[in-house]
Amino acid sequence: MKLDVNQLRYLSKDEFRTLQAVEMGQKNHELVPVPLINSIAGLKHGSAVRCLRSLLRSKLLHHDNSKLEAYRLTNMGYDFLALNALVKQGAVAAVGRQIGVGKESDVFEVLSPEGVRLALKLHRLGRTSFRAVATKRDYLRNRTSFSWLYLSRLAALKEFAFMKALGEHDFPVPVAVAHNRHAVLMSLVDGIPLVQIKELGHPGRVYRGCMGLMMRLARLGLVHCDYNEFNLMVDDDEKVTLIDFPQMVSTSHLNAQEWFEHDASCLHRFFTRKLGYIPELDPKDTGPPTFQDALAAASGTLDVELAASGFQRTFQRQNAQARAAKGARKSASRKGRRAVAAAI
Ligand code: ADP
Ligand code: MG
């Protein structure tokens, strides 16, 4: 997907008002009926219709008239609202090439007004489910309509807060610059993901560095939960930077130990199978880090500090729903769904 920041300049004030009105309407509607858009935007009928048409032409809105005349934001529409806010804040001046496609995000290189290159991550939670909606119409029946906007925004908020807190604790993470809606603006990491590396000069040092980082996180009360070769960037000096943390959980989470061990074994597998480095054969290796060791040496409560903003509570609710959906008892399943609906 191409994000043409120049298009922003061509959108009129009324068009932005209309786009924002659709966003507001989506708080309660999957598809926002035209009369509601008109009343939120406060424009004359003719002018609102013109704006809707031009936003549709620019692919910022999706139109549906199967039941009634209604619209919803496209990914690009939501991107534009976030980007416009970041431009107005003076954080972004231009958008460049796409540098990453994750399973749940698109990452672009952007320029600050001072000419500094930054990375803009646009979260896309639930985009796969919305593709499914197009083919399976009944898919939406039990779902909360605006979940992709909500979930993507929540993920960005979490990622920004974690990035900031980890940076303050001297972790090698990108510098958190700004965030808006589903977008996180951060410093550009000079390096490539570990997964793209075929050979390392000092694999043992990098391996121990990565495991050490995992232990440091756990000592502060956090488990990354997606700690693998896709989310560790390595530069020319083989210095590691950790990225991608909206899914981090507290070490007091019910499944924390399982996820911690999963993270450690993923990394171990990558080093042994892909890089040919066998830690057990290295005299410098002290064995895999254990969750108990980390807890015994706990040195902080970053999880509690971050949970204080309400992140953990919501995450646990979402998790409860995921577990319930996986076939737990019927009553538990109903409870989980209600909890998520309440959280949203
Ligand atoms: P996802 O949650 O979708 O996996 P990631 O945060 O892992 O998203 O980002 C996807 C890709 O984008 C990464 O593999 C990396 O190549 C690139 N990327 C992400 N953040 C940065 C950054 N700050 N600097 C440079 N590249 C980045
Ligand atoms: Mg990732």
Image (spheres, rainbow, N blue to C red):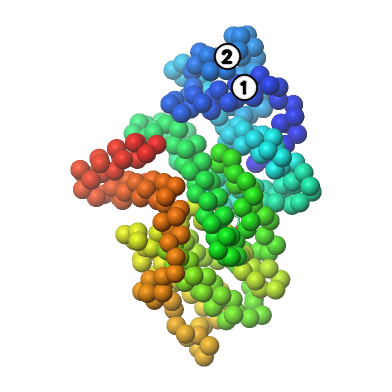
Residue identifier under label 2: 42
Whether residue 185 is visible, yes or no, is: yes
Q: Is residue 52 left or right of residue 304?
A: right
Residue drawn 41% across the image and 74% down it:
297
Q: Indicate if the residue with disc 2 has its beta carbon within 8 Å of ligand 1.
A: no
| Quarter assignment of residue 251 | bottom left
Tell me whether circle 2 and circle 1 mark residues in contact (CB < 8 Å): yes
The answer for how far apart the CA atoms under marks 2 and 1 are is: 9 Å
Q: Is residue 179 left or right of residue 27?
A: right
156 and 313: which is toward the camera: 313
| Quarter assignment of residue 231 | bottom right
139 and 51: which is toward the camera: 51
SS for tag 2?
Answer: loop
Residue drawn 35% across the image and 40% down it:
340
Residue 78, horizontal then vertical, whole percent: 58, 34
Whether residue 99 is visible, yes or no, is: no
Residue 257, horizontal then vertical, whole percent: 36, 67
Q: Quadrant of the N terminus?
A: top right
Residue drawn 54% across the image and 78% down it:
208
Residue 102, horizontal then vertical, whole percent: 56, 52
Residue 145, horizontal then vertical, whole percent: 42, 31
Q: Indicate if the residue with disc 1 has its beta carbon within 8 Å of ligand 1.
A: no
| Identity, as a three-letter code, of the amino acid under mark 1 | Arg
| Quarter assignment of residue 46 | top right
- Image quadrant of ligand 1 equals bottom right
Q: Is residue 218 left or right of residue 173?
A: left
SS for tag 1?
Answer: helix
Residue drawn 43% across the image and 62% down it:
301
| Identity, as a three-letter code, of the amino acid under mark 2 | Gly
Residue identifier under label 1: 17
